[in-house]
Amino acid sequence: SQTIHQWPATLVQPVGSPLSLECTVEGTSNPNLYWYRQAAGRGLQLLFYSVGIGQISSEVPQNLSASRPQDRQFILSSKKLLLSDSGFYLCAWSVRGLEQYFGPGTRLTVT
Amino acid sequence: QKEVEQDPGPLSVPEGAIVSLNCTYSNSAFQYFMWYRQYSRKGPELLMYTYSSGNKEDGRFTAQVDKSSKYISLFIRDSQPSDSATYLCAMSAGNQFYFGTGTSLTVIP
């Protein structure tokens, strides 16, 4: 069966510090991978998605970036965090745009 | 106009009630329809998915899709306190997914 991992689960970072969130998927090959942000009381905002190694599509201009160094690894990064980057970050995978599965999420607080 | 509209609630029902959750959408290109359950501070969990108009049943849950009206529903029978969560509808077209903002449900014992 497929499993998706995200870490860390919780993170508190000062403004201006760098960020690296990691997501890995097990049990499937060549998945589509996604990063979403969910602000309190709001819906899911798509940040990035990838259909293959090194292929990244950005949906929202911001100070975040994403990379996919391996087939089942997706990394979300920032060089300098802003207060507005606080939120619940979710990684997800799907195969060919069919049903999508989410990871447990990382709760980021920027202070 | 948003691609997907969902009433945010909150919705509060007594235990044992039938719950109806709904979403409307505007893009006729949507082909795949999903319902997720999200507990507080957890990732969304896929409950049901379907790609055709009609009903799909899984235990106490029934998903209904009406493509002609661009309307989808999730019915929960014999609701339990453990069903208290936020429910998200989602739809896909190609490689992208579009989500409702979620409906908060509380089932009172």
Image: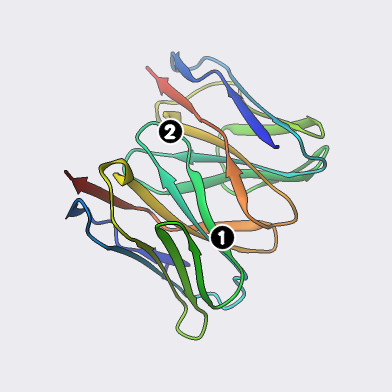
Chain label for disc 2: B
Mark 1 vs mark 2, foreground winner is 1
Pick the quarter of the image with the C terminus of chain A: top left
Which element carries disc 2, helix, strand or loop? loop
Q: Residues within 10 Å of mark 1 (few under 14, many from 20)?
A: many
**Amino acid under disc 1:** Tyr
Q: Position of residue B67 (x, y in %)?
A: 52, 80
On whether disc 1 and disc 2 are found on a single subunit, the reply is yes
In the depicted structure, whether residue A48 falls above or below residue B56: above
Q: Residues within 10 Å of mark 2 (few under 14, many from 20)?
A: some
Q: Quadrant of residue B50?
A: bottom right
Label drawn at residue B49: 1
Pick the quarter of the image with the N terminus of chain A: top right
Mark count? 2
Chain label for disc 1: B
Residue A107 in the figure: left or right of residue A100: left
**Where does label 2 land, which residue?**
B42
Residue at image x 46%, y 47%? Answer: A44
Q: Position of residue B3 (x, y in %)?
A: 48, 67
In the depicted structure, whether residue A83 falls above or below residue B3: above
Which element carries disc 1, helix, strand or loop? strand
Residue B16 in the figure: left or right of residue A41: left
In the depicted structure, whether residue A50 falls above or below residue B49: above
Q: Position of residue B86 (x, y in %)?
A: 34, 47
Q: Quadrant of residue B82?
A: top left
Q: Along the line of sight, which residue is nearer the eye, A29 or A36?
A: A29
**Amino acid under disc 2:** Lys
Residue at image x 59%, y 25%? Answer: A6
